[in-house]
Image (tube, rainbow, N blue to C red):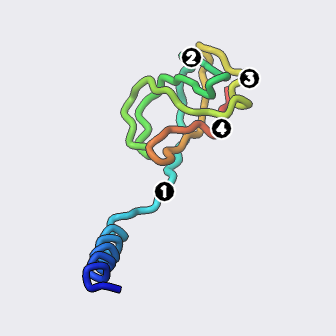
Amino acid sequence: MSSSTQHRMLALAAALAMTSFYVTPAVAQEATAKGEVRRVDAAAGKITIKHGAISELDLPAMTLVYIADAKLLTQIKPGDKITFKAKRVNGQYVVTEISK
């Protein structure tokens, strides 16, 4: 192996070692909140909910589109007052439970 190739390999190893210090695992944060359903798109797996502040998710009071399993959305319609459990996973907000 030439010294040039060895130098490149050492530089690559050093770069990879440095980036490992900056990688943090994605941790799901979860919270329970109350809100009002504004829109349901079961086919796309989305629900729009108007809710108060959710401190556990660092969300102010707002209307937000959440991802949800279509099975959770079958009995839900706009205007319903709900209690829901949501979490943030890799920057996306996901509803995991819904009750009226």
* Whole-number angstrom distance, CA of label 1 to CA of label 4: 19 Å
Q: Earlier in the sequence, mark 3 or mark 1?
A: 1
* Whole-number angstrom distance, CA of label 3 to CA of label 1: 29 Å
Residue at the image position 62 percent from the left and 33 percent from the top: 68
Location of the N terminus by quadrant is bottom left
Q: Is residue 39 above or below residue 89?
A: above
Q: Secondary structure at mark 4?
A: strand
* Whole-number angstrom distance, CA of label 3 to CA of label 4: 12 Å
Q: Earlier in the sequence, mark 2 or mark 1?
A: 1
At label 3, counting other C-alpha atoms closer than 10 Å, the crowd grade (few under 14, some 14-19, many 20 or more) is few
* Whole-number angstrom distance, CA of label 2 to CA of label 1: 28 Å
- Amino acid of disc 4: Glu
Q: Which residue is mark 3?
A: 74
Q: Earlier in the sequence, mark 3 or mark 2?
A: 2
Q: Which numbered tag is attached to residue 97?
A: 4
- Amino acid of disc 1: Val
For residue 59, what is the image quadrant? Answer: top left
Q: Position of residue 46 (x, y in %)?
A: 58, 26
Q: Which residue is mark 2?
A: 39
Q: Which numbered tag is attached to residue 27?
A: 1
* Whole-number angstrom distance, CA of label 4 to CA of label 2: 16 Å
In screen coordinates, is 37 left or right of 74?
left
- Amino acid of disc 3: Thr
